[in-house]
Image (cartoon, rainbow, N blue to C red):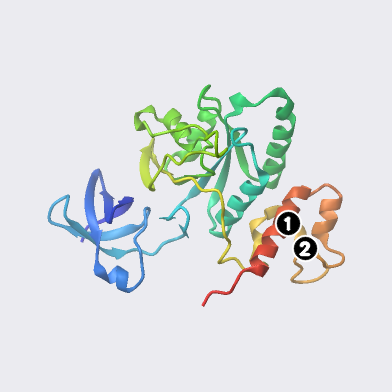
Amino acid sequence: MPEGKIIKALSGFYYVLDGEEVIQCRGRGVFRKRKITPLVGDSVVYQAEKPTDGYVIEIKDRKNELVRPPIANIDQAILVFSAVEPDFSTTLLDRFLVAIEDNEIEPIIIISKIDLVVEAKKASLDQYMRDYQEIGYTVIKTSSITSDGIEALLPHLAGKTSVFAGQSGVGKSSLLNTINPELSLETNDISSHLGRGKHTTRHVELIHVGSGLVADTPGFSSLEFMDIEVERLAYCFPEIYQAGEKCKYRGCLHDKEPKCAVKEGVAQGEIPSYRHKHYLQILEEIKDRKPRY
């Protein structure tokens, strides 16, 4: 039977890319009974007598999946955070990074709207960039107005399936339009009343950009950590995990334990204090969450 990849899910239909042809499919009832929902990015087996009347009959094993946005089999996450409007937030960025790291997806950090940065904010923004680069993350500054950073980003997209994610209003759709003007994705400005972006992307869809596939996803501003255990959290902060290898006590949570190498690293300026602060905040969230039954 033919196989393909779901590139869009909308109103109960799944659009399956097979070569250069897109087949409109529905999901078999067996998925509902087994509480499995086909996701954009899924590799599937389908059957169809004509391009507008097919059925997804099997979902291949996933290498990863995200809940918000709902998408599977991602190679990398392009995390877009604006320098201003809305202001750059290390708190929100670190929450996104934890969610991505926990799913073992490679993150690339994009700082957008750099053309709007006033001189007084450039030094602090550059310091944040250096912090994340020293941890080992790829960080690229971009502007959809001046096209700065676009050439640096393009090689990272080639041949990969990427998800563009970030808070609404940071310019994800504008960035994709700059990369490929033929996309003509809907964009909108920041709401002056709410102080945050208006949602312009209403569903997840994989689109061709060069030799890769990218997903422009609905914006969202909060993340929950329902599946991460406390022992796992340090893995999602690479510099904390590395320093934690030198802790005196096995299983150290880098919180109240004595002779903690992570806390020593923070005190010596080797680990950014805000990163450790965010780690502790998420640690408390995980400890306080209600068990699921």
From the top left corner, tell me how far across and down residue 263 is, in percent.
82, 57
- Comes first in the chain, label 2 or label 1: 1
Residue found at x 86% / y 67%: 258
Residue found at x 36% / y 70%: 35
Q: Is residue 42 left or right of residue 100?
A: left
Looking at the picture, tell me which residue is in the foreground, 177 or 234. 177
From the top left corner, tell me how far across and down residue 84 is, in percent.
62, 32
Q: Which quadrant of the view contains residue 215?
A: top left
From the top left corner, tell me how far across and down residue 133 is, in percent.
67, 41
Query: Residue 124, which numbered label?
Result: none
Relative height, residue 84 to residue 217 (above, below): above
Q: Is residue 83 left or right of residue 10?
A: right
Residue found at x 38% / y 64%: 61
Query: Residue 240, which numbered label?
Result: 1
Q: Is residue 19 left or right of residue 278?
A: left
State whether residue 29 appears in this view: yes
Q: Quadrant of the N terminus?
A: bottom left
Q: At numbered mark 2, what does the secondary structure look like: helix, strand or loop?
A: loop
- Graded by Cα atoms within 10 Å as few (under 14), some (14 to 19) or many (20 or more), the crowding at tag 1 reads many
Farthest left residue in view: 49
Q: What type is the residue that disc 2 sits on?
A: His
Residue found at x 57% / y 38%: 195
Relative height, residue 34 to residue 40 (above, below): below
Q: Is residue 174 left or right of residue 137?
A: left
Relative height, residue 162 to residue 236 (above, below): above
**Residue beneath disc 2:** 254
Q: Are marks 2 and 1 in contact (CB under 8 Å)?
A: yes
Q: What type is the residue that disc 1 sits on?
A: Ile
